[in-house]
Each structure stands twice: as C-alpha cells, then as structure tokens.
Amino acid sequence: MRRVRVLVGLAAAVVAATLPTGGAAAPTQNHVSIETNAQWWDGHVEVQVHVACENGGFPASVEVQAFQSPPENFAPTQGFGASGVTCDGQQRQAAVHVVPAGAPFDVGKAFAVATVSTQFGTATDSKTINITF
C-alpha cells in the first residue's frame, strides 16, 4: 500500500513539473481559413488559405482537399494538396495547389476542407469555394 502511495505521489510530481507556471505564455491557438475564390489552372485548383499557428517557429503543413460534382463538371472529382507554412503565431498566407485524383476540376463551385496540425492542436475550416479563371 505504501508503494502505491509513493508511485502516485511521484506521478503527481511529474505531472506538476510539466505544467506551465503562471508566468509562462500559453501557446497560440492554431487557426486556418479558406479564401472564397480559388484559381483554376488547367484542371488543377490553387486555393488560398490564411494560417496562424504555433509550433516553436518550425514549419507545419497546411493540407487542402477539394471536392466537385456535376453539374459543375462532367464527373465527380476530388483532389489534395499541401503547402509548408511557418508556425510562429503570426498570420501567414499560403497558396495550396490541389491536384485532382480523377477527373479534372472545372470552373464553378467546389467544396474545400483545409487543415493545419501542430503539437499544440489542429485547426480545420471548410466551405464552398468559387473556382474561377
């Protein structure tokens, strides 16, 4: 019984030592947002995103998936793209080149999902985008 109490006490001390003190700044919350308009490039799509994240100044990847269905194009398609972004708590803009996995994208509406993940959390945005020339 005494051994269990000692182990519980040690575990509590380790947890307390890893928690930030009152003077330590909390990390910035990760945030990502998708621009409403995207650029069509010969069947591919360039999606602009705004990212603010914290990762100790190290880069992270912002990933974008896009989905488009008739009547916007002749066949349902989806695509994926990723771009590196510096995560230092400042807002950054990134252009993510989304490559279709099947039929090409066409001008019109599509649905996009953007995600950025770091050791401090994950942020996601999704919306209907307008693909234009």
Image (spheres, helix red, strand yellow):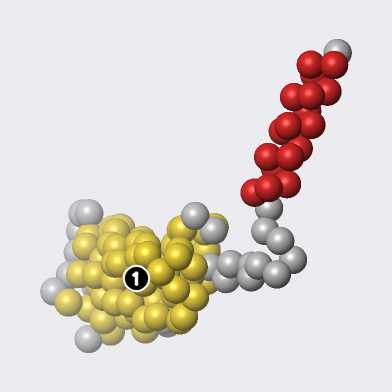
- Image quarter of the C terminus: bottom left
Please tell me which residue is depicted at 29% across the width and 77% down the height of the picture: 95
Considering only vertical position in the picture, is 131 above or below 57?
below
Estimate the x, y position of residue 86 in percent, counting from the top left. 36, 72
Please tell me which residue is depicted at 79% across the width and 31% down the height of the picture: 9
Q: What residue type is labelled 1?
A: Val
- 88 or 79, nearer to the observer: 88
Question: Tag 1's secondary structure?
Answer: strand
Please tell me which residue is depicted at 73% across the width and 32% down the height of the picture: 10
- Count of numbered circles on the image: 1
Residue assigned mark 1: 85
In the displayed structure image, the side of residue 99 where residue 116 appears, left or right: right
**Which picture quadrant has residue 120?**
bottom right
In the displayed structure image, the side of residue 61 where residue 42 appears, left or right: left
Please tell me which residue is depicted at 20% across the width and 69% down the height of the picture: 44
Estimate the x, y position of residue 46 in percent, counting from the top left. 26, 75
Estimate the x, y position of residue 114 in percent, counting from the top left. 42, 65
- 58 or 121, nearer to the observer: 58
